[in-house]
Amino acid sequence: MADIKKDVLEIVSMVVEKDAKEIPLDAHLIQDVGADSMMALEILAALEKKYRIVIPEDKLKEMTTVNKIIAMVETAKKR
């Protein structure tokens, strides 16, 4: 879990161009962090590549916080 959390934060911070320490795990990525839908797609693609998982694009709208993304990755890895 700690590695997934670190990896997800790293990817999110890289895509939104903010320091990982500036991104609270429960902050809304669009409203609080300044991400947009293209950034969400970029995050999704990076996670799929890193973990060799598939996250359906309809799950994009659920990727609202880092915590939710972490949970999504964990779920996808169990499949």
Image (cartoon, rainbow, N blue to C red):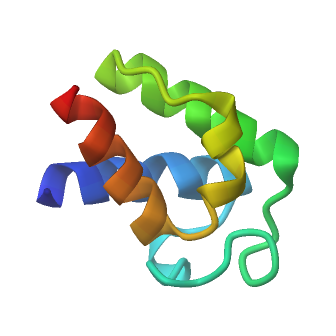
Q: Is 28 in front, or is 12? A: 28
Number of marks in picture = 0
Query: Which quadrant would residue 17 be assigned to in this image?
Result: bottom right
Which residue does the image show at 28% across and 57% down from the upper left?
6
Q: Viewed as shown, does residue 33 lie left or right of 43? A: right
Residue 59 x %, y %: 61, 44
Q: Viewed as shown, does residue 41 lie left or right of 19? A: right
Quarter of the picture containing the N terminus is bottom left
Q: Is 63 in front, or is 36? A: 63
Q: Is residue 51 above or below residue 19?
A: above
Q: Is residue 48 above or below residue 11?
A: above
Which residue does the image show at 59% across and 84% down from the upper left?
27
Residue 66 x %, y %: 48, 66
Which residue does the image show at 49% across and 83% down from the upper left?
26
Residue 46 x %, y %: 53, 28
Q: Viewed as shown, does residue 68 lie left or right of 70? A: right
Q: In this view, does 67 lie above or below 61?
A: below
Residue 29 x %, y %: 69, 70
Q: Is 38 in front, or is 61? A: 61
Q: In this view, does 67 lie above or below 2?
A: below
Which residue does the image show at 77% across and 45% down from the upper left?
39
Quarter of the picture containing the C terminus is top left
